[in-house]
Image: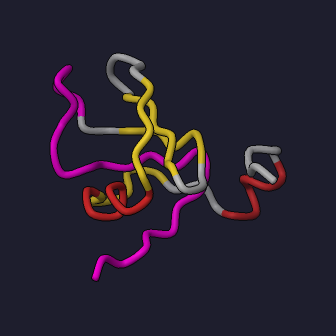
């Protein structure tokens, strides 16, 4: 069983394999059944099904606190 990763919009994460551009940092832009990600190197936008994201997740580079995300209006309702 894969553990569900707690993330917020604005978090920067690393995944198992780097993007073809060579960078392995992704910014979370969308939450839900699909996780929206933007490559921090080339700006490519991708969406991963939640299960695939949880399997590929490695670590956090930068975390946005839950309270900070809601104050800035980044949390989707």
Residue 27 percent coordinates (x, y): 47, 39
Left or right: 7 with respect to 71? left
Q: Quadrant of residue 4?
A: bottom left
Which color mode does the image show?
secondary structure
Q: Position of residue 56 (x, y in %)?
A: 25, 56
Q: Give the image location of residue 62, x and y in percent.
A: 46, 51
- From what the image shows, is residue 21 above or below residue 60? above
The reply, left or right, for residue 28 in relation to residue 61 is right
Main secondary structure along the magenta-highlighted residues: loop
Q: Is 27 located above or below residue 68 in the figure?
A: above
Figure quadrant of the N terminus:
bottom left
Q: Is residue 35 above or below residue 45?
A: below
Residue at 51% x, 69% y is 6
- Tag count: 0
Question: Quadrant location of residue 74?
Answer: top right
Confirm whether the magenta stretch covers residue 22.
yes
Bounds of the magenta segment: 1-23
Q: Nearer the viewer, residue 1 or 24?
A: 1
Q: Point out residue 16 in the picture as x, y percentages from the top left corner.
A: 18, 51
Q: Residue furthest top?
A: 42
Which residue is at 74% across, 51% downward?
75
Corner quadrant of residue 24: top left
Residue at image coords 27%, 63%: 55
Task: Tell me the residue at 82%/44% (across/down).
Answer: 73
Q: Is residue 10 left or right of residue 74?
A: left
| Left-right relation of 6 to 25 | right
């Amino acid at each position: 069983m894969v553990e569900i990763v707690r993330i917020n919009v604005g978090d920067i994460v690393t995944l198992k394999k780097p993007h073809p551009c060579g960078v392995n940092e992704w910014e979370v832009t969308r939450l839900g059944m699909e996780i929206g990600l933007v490559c921090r190197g080339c700006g490519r936008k991708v969406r991963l099904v939640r299960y695939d994201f949880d399997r590929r997740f490695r670590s956090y580079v930068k975390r946005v606190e839950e309270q900070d995300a809601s104050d800035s209006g980044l949390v989707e309702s």
